[in-house]
Structure formats: C-alpha cells, structure tokens
Image (cartoon, rainbow, N blue to C red):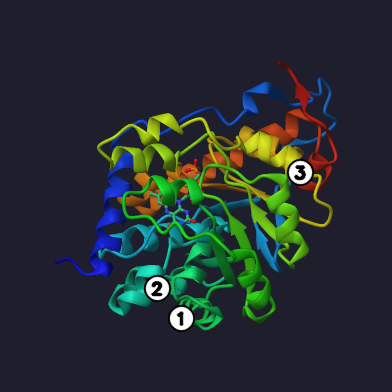
Amino acid sequence: MKSSSNIIANRKSEHIDTVLTKNVQAVKSGLFQFKLPYSTLPEVNYNDVDSGIDFLGKKLSFPFLISSMTGGPEETGFINKNLASAAEEMKVGLGLGSMRVVLKHPQTSKSFDVRQYCPSIPLFANIGLVQLNYGVGVDEINYLIKLFKADGIFLHVNPIQEVIQPEGDTNFAGLLDKLASIIDKIDGHVILKEVGTGFDQQTAQQLKNIGVKWIDVSGMGGTSWTLVEGHRRDDDLGELFRNEGYTTVESLKALVKVEGLNLIAGGGLRSGLDIAKVLMLGAEVATAGTPLLKPALESVDQCIHVINQLKKELQISMFIAGVKTIHELKSKSLIFIN
Ligand SMILES: Cc1cc2nc3c(=O)[nH]c(=O)nc-3n(C[C@H](O)[C@H](O)[C@H](O)COP(=O)(O)O)c2cc1C
C-alpha cells in the first residue's frame, strides 16, 4: 500500500502533467469586457514609467507574485529553484506550493528550500485551510514559515477542488472559528487564496471580520481545478461543475466592497495588460501560475523572459493610459465594452 505522503507527491506530479497536457481552462476571466482609458496625448515619457511598488515591506519591480504551484516530489525542487532565482532577478514575489507533504514526509522539504536563491523577495509558504480539520494547527503553520524562511503563508481554500478530487479532504465545517482562534498567533503575513474558482463577498467579509487582511481571489478564467480533478475521475463531475464559481472579474468586483480588505488578483491573468486591468479593478498585486510552469521546467532564463514580458506589457499599458506610477494607474477607471 502507498503511504499518504507518496499519494500526495504522486498527485502533485499528476496535477502538473494534467495542467501541461490538457485544456483545463473552463471559462474566461472576464477581463476582455474592459479596455484601458487610452490617452491620445499621454504627456508621459515612456522611460519615466515606474511600475515599482512596496508590498508587505519589500520592493517589487512591478505588482506581481508567482502563484503557489509546487513542491514535494524530488523533481519539483528544480521548478521551485528556477522560479525562486527568476523571482529574485526580476524582484517579484513567490508563493510555494502546498506543504502538507512536508508535515507527513519531512524529507520532501528540500524541494521547497529555496530561500537562498531569493533572499530579498516576499516568499510564502502554503497549506490548505481545510487542514485545520485534519491535524494541522498554528504550530505546524509556524513551523513551515520558519523552516522555509518565508514572509508568511498562503492558506488556500478550495472546496470544489477537494470535493471533485477522488481522495479530497471535504470536512470544511468550523474552519472560520478555527482560523479566528489562531490568526493572531501566526508568525508572518496571512493571505487567504482560492485556487481558480474565486471568492464570494460573504466569505471575504467573514474572513475580514476575524482579522484576515489579504485575499488572493484566484478566480475562474485560468487553470480550473474542477477540470483538473475531473480528469482524474472516471465520471463527468468535473464537466458538470466546470462553470460553478466566480470569474476573477466577478470576484474582484464583489470583494472591493469589503472595506479594509487588501486584494490580490489571480486566475487567468496572461499578460501585463491583464495585470493593469486587475490593478484598476482594485487589486494591489497580481498573480499567475500556469504561465510560469513550463518555463520553470526549462530554465531560469525562460522564467525571466516570461516575467519580463509581463512587466513590459504592464508598463506599455501604463504609458498608453497616461500614467507614470501604479498609484496613478489605480486611480483611473477601466472602460466597460460589453
Ligand atoms: C501545477 C499547479 C499546481 C498548483 N498547486 C497549488 C498549491 O499547491 N496550492 C495553492 O494554493 N494553489 C495551487 N495552484 C493554484 C495556483 O496558485 C493559482 O491559484 C491557479 O492556478 C490560478 O492561476 P492561473 O490561472 O494563473 O494558473 C496550482 C496551480 C498549478 C498550475
């Protein structure tokens, strides 16, 4: 019989394989419905456009964070190392993949151990919030943050993925109270994130009420974990539920109404123009996962190339909208086109 750690590690490899080989985009992010407020006379020197921001006390060259993806199987150490080196070179943030496997199988920790390659950037640990119902508590969370010298942790919330996943963890009862009882004891920044199905406003408000300051909406429009897990089953559950959830745009528009909450936007962002749009819709930082996966399997240079392109596209977006800074960009409104 396989040990649970092997099951987690094998699942991670299957996930990567499915994302790389199958079409797992269920719907569009909704960003095509908007265009920039194009300025015919921007009165800006393109060379003066500055996309830099401060994020949680650290500087980013543009508001971007590589979304949590991997770790566990030995070969994923190479992916994380490439992502970390590229993130350091480009001065963007990095979220590592789910670390539950480390708690079950400590020798897998090497695949997440990348702080030496990215000493100056915001680096985040990751674990499913649902694991609070499966033996994980504040000690384990703080252990992971400390072990990987992270600035904090992404706690992912993914009910649709877990329930479609053949071997998913589906006891989501009482998680709000459990999080409320530990949130002040977590030694680092806490960011709640979805994995590609989006957040509803009520959940976001409840999380804000218990002290959550940051949410990454990770909405529909990119990688669909409903479809990824559906591919691992022998029935049609993935197909049946493929349209359920909130697009990145729907989720952002709902969550900006939650006063005092800081938003990160991910899910289907595929260009610097998409990044400009989510910033204008209220996000402080943008994330992307899948666009970096294949490059990370190849080299640091490939990752740098993709991140550099996103940065350039964002800076062009800023220029044609007639702004020099991210602050100015965020003060402008998108044009709704359909
Ligand atoms: C191969 C792969 C593995 C992922 N693993 C995790 C994970 O371990 N923890 C997590 O919070 N999100 C995970 N995600 C979800 C991403 O962080 C992100 O929220 C989602 O893919 C949507 O962004 P995208 O459309 O840019 O890929 C994973 C995504 C990919 C592509």
Taking the image as drawn, is residue 247 in sight?
yes
Q: Earlier in the sequence, mark 3 or mark 2?
A: 2
Residue at left offset 47%, top offset 67%: 131
For marks 3 and 1, the one nearer the N-term is 1
Circle 2/circle 1 CB separation < 8 Å: yes
Using the image, determine if residue 87 lies above or below residue 265: below
Q: Quadrant of the C terminus?
A: top right
Q: CA distance from mark 3 to mark 1?
A: 33 Å
**Residue that badge 2 annotates:** 113
Residue that appears at 21% across and 70% down: 3
Judged left or right of residue 236, residue 145 is: right
Secondary element at image label 1? helix
Rounded to the nearest angstrom, the CA distance separating label 3 from label 2 is 33 Å
Q: Residues within 10 Å of mark 3 (few under 14, many from 20)?
A: many
Name the residue carrying label 3: 282
Does mark 1's beta carbon lie closer than 8 Å to ligand 1?
no
Estimate the x, y position of residue 210 in percent, counting from the top left. Answer: 74, 67
Place of residue 299 in the rendered image (x, y in percent of width and height, measured from the top left): 34, 52
Tag 3 secondary structure: loop
Residue at image coords 45%, 38%: 224
Circle 2: is it few (<14), some (14-19), or many (20+) Cα within 10 Å? some
Q: Nearer the viewer, mark 3 or mark 2?
A: 3
Check disc 1 and report the residue beneath it: 147
Q: Are marks 3 and 1 in contact (CB under 8 Å)?
A: no
Amino acid tagged 1: Leu
| Label tally | 3
